[in-house]
Amino acid sequence: MVIKVFVATSSGSTAIKKKQQEVVGFLEANKIDFQQMDIAGDEDNRKWMRENVPGEKKPQNGIPLPPQIFNEERYCGDFESFFSAKEENIIYSFLGLAPPPGTKETEKSEVTDEAESHTEDKADEGAHEEAQSAQSPSEEQQEEEQQKEGEEQQEKGEEQQEEGEEQQEKGEEQQEEGGEQQEGGEGKEAVKEQEES
């Protein structure tokens, strides 16, 4: 199975370029085999991609934008789907691949398998409900932690922006002071010239 990432190597959109780089960089970093299929330089690739993206995933104008991800002929998703799967640590199932041993996705599936076999052994529905409720808080806690991290990063960004604005103001003040000093120096030279003549 080969993962195919449809990209536009000569795209003028920086947003598309960043999304493509993020997908390709992630796959390379995780040593996931894939092929880059250029839709900008190959009309056949462009046509194939457009025909094989499902209707519900196409934008209103009907032309899907790169990156689009396939596993052979099977459509996996666009950048937003990829990003969500990456955040949820389910990228291998998103790509239709078996997760390698030791990954978080493997651990999740093992925990799920153990929980399922445990609940099947017990006929008591109460035990089944307890197992489900025991799993839910950890997902909620993860979402809360992610939200807190996002808020902290946003606050840091705002602080950095304020610092940058303060530095800019200081620089402008220094520039004004330098201009005033220069004007004062020119006035002294004019007085000297008058005195000499």
Image (tube, rainbow, N blue to C red):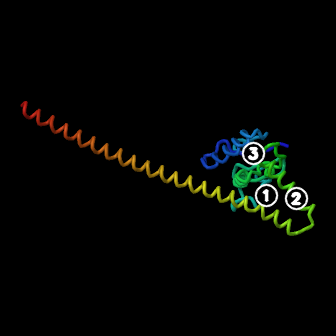
* Real-space Cα separation, disc 3 to disc 1, in angstroms: 16 Å
Query: Which amino acid type is marked by label 1?
Result: Pro
Q: Earlier in the sequence, mark 2 or mark 1?
A: 1
Helix, strand or loop at mark 1: loop
* Real-space Cα separation, disc 2 to disc 1, in angstroms: 33 Å
Helix, strand or loop at mark 2: helix
Residue 112: which quarter of the image? Answer: bottom right
Picture residue at 43% right of the left edge, 49% below the top: 163
In the rendering, which numbered label is found on residue 54? 1
Relative depth, front residue between 134 and 107: 134
Q: Is residue 195 left or right of residue 189?
A: left
* Real-space Cα separation, disc 3 to disc 2, in angstroms: 35 Å
Relative depth, front residue between 73 and 143: 143
Residue 182: which quarter of the image? Answer: top left
Q: Is residue 124 visible?
A: yes
Residue 136's place in the image compared with 91, above or below, is below
Residue 30: which quarter of the image? Answer: top right
Q: Residues within 10 Å of mark 2 (few under 14, many from 20)?
A: some
Residue 62 x, y percent position in the rendering: 72, 59
Picture residue at 82% right of the left edge, 42% below the top: 101
Query: Which amino acid type is marked by label 3?
Result: Val
Query: Which amino acid type is marked by label 2?
Result: Glu
Residue 153 x, y percent position in the rendering: 56, 52
In the rendering, which numbered label is found on residue 116? 2
Q: Is residue 44 visible?
A: no
Residue 192's place in the image compared with 166, above or below, is above
Q: Quadrant of the C terminus?
A: top left
Q: Earlier in the sequence, mark 3 or mark 1?
A: 3
In the rendering, which numbered label is found on residue 5? 3
